Image: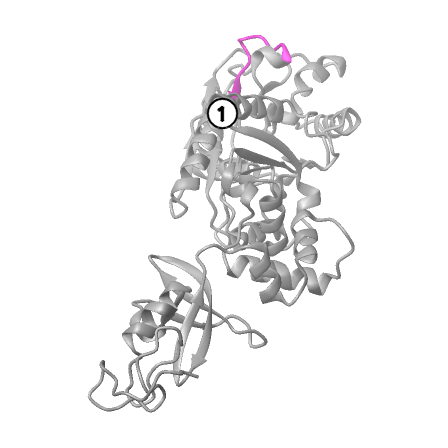
Amino acid sequence: PCTLPPAPCTLHPAPCTLHPAPCTLHPAPCTLHPAPCTTHYRRQRHYGWTPLEKRKTKFYGKLDNRTDIYYLNRQGKVFPCLLKPFHGVYFVVMSDRVSIYSIARTAGVSVSTVSKVINGQGKISSATARRVRSVMKRLNYSPQQRRSSCNTIGVVIFSADNKPFGCRFNISLLNSISEHLFMREKNLTLLAGERLESLNSDELFCYCTANSLAGLLVMNLHLSSPFNEVLLQSKIPFILLANASSVSHPCNYVTSSNYRSTKEMLEYMICLGHHRIAFFSVICNQVESHIERLRAYHDVLREHDLPINSKYLLDLPDASLDTISNSLQKLLAPIEKPTALFLASEMLEKIPQLLPSLGYRIPEDISVAGFMNEKEDIGQTPDFSAIRQDTAEMGRRSVMHLLNLLDQPEEKVAEEVACKITFGKTVRRIADEPSAAT
């Protein structure tokens, strides 16, 4: 209580019943007037308090019914705050910087628990971990490590056999990505897609935050995978590589011109007289790029009024030598066998070397064309009729777009890189065949 003798309030016309004289130490406003005394207000502002009605901010509402944490929008950013009633006036107690201590206070756990959740260490119950991650995401919390050094990009690779470097296409694309990341003084971290696929959006956000991952490049992600939705909800900048996004999960992507390149090569083969063309692929229904190539195959045959024979559509479960050999022998056994093979996957690059061992000459007995890796990687002659994806350009553009997303998260990326097409001598001209209708 004030010890000063009674005197009228110099700030208001009526005497102040709470304080006989203006008090420079007590933070309570005058009870006879709706606004607090300016002396008290200056003192409160010194301690980081401001009256709610004097702030030009948008009030979002409570974060959690069990706490007193609220949302306030200031200069386009969302910050946590505390609303404290004091003599009928609500004051905002807030701090611009969200720390691990405020996360612990909001989630109702200890600071060590929050630290264990961020670093993925210790034995924490799933319910507690989910509550802490939810608070971190809603308060826009990022550890100091991620704020100071966002110079690491994670490359997520999905590989069914856990051999990401067993595919030559992955090796070429990773070489291009690492080259352009290192040129921009960024680090590269390889991540197993199968391990991240089990995380939810909050867990993925915390994983990237704890490991200082500024963004993700995702390779070989299946369209049916729920990880597409997890990536979107996590708000982590990412780009799909070599696969376009589906309609149900619109994502940023950099891919090759699979449809246009396949259509151009098939039309070239039809112009040389090939009406029975077999379509070879590997797990076609799970990879968007292979789905686009199959769609081009159906469209070209329909445009030229050619029948679609289901026996000529081979979707192999894997690209092992035994699987490919058995499928070729079964395909080429009938009398009316196909005159040409279209290879819809780079994983089938063994077929040109396997056909001579089965007694078939290229192109005298059967013509072959399709997607191949770079010539220096597989030892192919320049006369091979092939479609080659420009992995160097795909890597360069994916890195460029992802780094732009870090500064402009609202940017949309949907780019196709043109493939390199070579019309070689592995597809020969044959006499016009009668159509199936004839």
Residue lying farthest to the left in this orientation: 13
The quarter of the image holding the N terminus is bottom left
| In the image, residue 411 lies in the stretch drawn in magenta | no
Total labels: the figure holds 1
Residue 151: give x, y in percent of width and height: 52, 33
Judged by its main secondary structure, the magenta piece is: loop
Tell me where the magenta segment starts and ends, as one range: 378-390
Image-based side of 176 in relation to 15, left or right:
right
Where does residue 96 sit, x and y in percent of width and height? 43, 57
Residue shown at 66% from the left, 28% from the top? 336
Residue 380 part of the magenta-drawn span: yes
Instruction: Classify 184 as above or below 18.
Output: above
- Horizontal and vertical percent for residue 202? 60, 56
Residue holding disc 1: 185
Instruction: Look at the image and tell me whether residue 334 can be seen.
Output: yes
Where does residue 38 sit, x and y in percent of width and height? 28, 74
Q: Is residue 433 above or below residue 191?
A: above
Q: Tell me the residue at 39%/80% (across/down).
A: 28
Q: Is residue 275 left or right of residue 16?
A: right
| Disc 1, SS | loop
Residue 371 visible from this viewpoint: no
